[in-house]
Amino acid sequence: MRRLRRPRIDTGEVSDRWQPRLYLRLIVLGLLVAWVIAFVLENRTQVSVHFVLGTARVSLVWVILLAQLERRRRRRSHQASEH
């Protein structure tokens, strides 16, 4: 009984194709992580958020993120009501 062999893959050709793409993804991921860290560090100051019955002190980064989430939620509910 004769065994069938798998065809050999030219590893030089494969590595030439995926290595630059891998390095590009790693660079983009590193830049994204650096941006997130810089964003948090620049917006970590405490701010007062005034409510009707009280005041809370939170980091500015949380105010920004929660405002963006609320904005996205309102936009989605508005688009759903139009359809």
Image (spheres, rainbow, N blue to C red):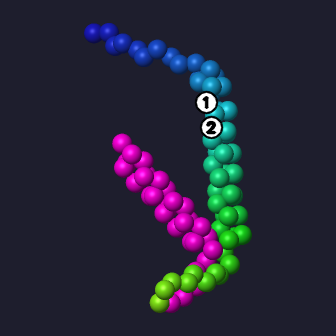
Quadrant for residue 74, please give it: bottom left
Instruction: Name the quarter where the C terminus is drawn.
Output: top left
Write the start and end of the magenta stretch as one range.
54-83
Residue 24 lies in the magenta stretch = no
Q: Residue furthest left?
A: 1
Q: Residue furthest bottom?
A: 54
At 58% from the left edge and 18% from the top edge, which residue is drawn?
Answer: 10
Secondary structure state at the residue bearing disc 1? helix
Rounded to the nearest whole Å, what is the CA distance between mark 1 and mark 2?
6 Å
Q: Amino acid at mark 1?
A: Trp
At 61% from the left edge and 30% from the top edge, which residue is drawn?
Answer: 18
Q: Residue furthest top?
A: 2
Mark 1 burial class by Cα count in 10 Å: few <14, some 14-19, many 20+: few
Q: Position of residue 41 (x, y in %)?
A: 69, 70
Q: Which residue is mark 2?
A: 22
The dot on residue 67 is none
Residues tagged 1 and 2 counted as in contact (Cβ below 8 A): yes
Looking at the picture, tell me which residue is in the foreground, 45 or 75: 75
Q: Position of residue 25 (x, y in %)?
A: 63, 41
* Residue 1, above or below 20: above
Q: Amino acid at mark 2?
A: Leu
What secondary structure predominates along the stretch shown in magenta?
helix
At 49% from the left edge and 56% from the top edge, which residue is drawn?
Answer: 72
Q: Residue 27 vs residue 54: left or right? A: right
Q: Position of residue 63 (x, y in %)?
A: 57, 72
The dot on residue 18 is 1
Quadrant for residue 42, please give it: bottom right
Q: How many marks?
A: 2
Secondary structure state at the residue bearing disc 2? helix
* Residue 22, above or below 82: above
Q: Residue 77 vs residue 55: left or right? A: left
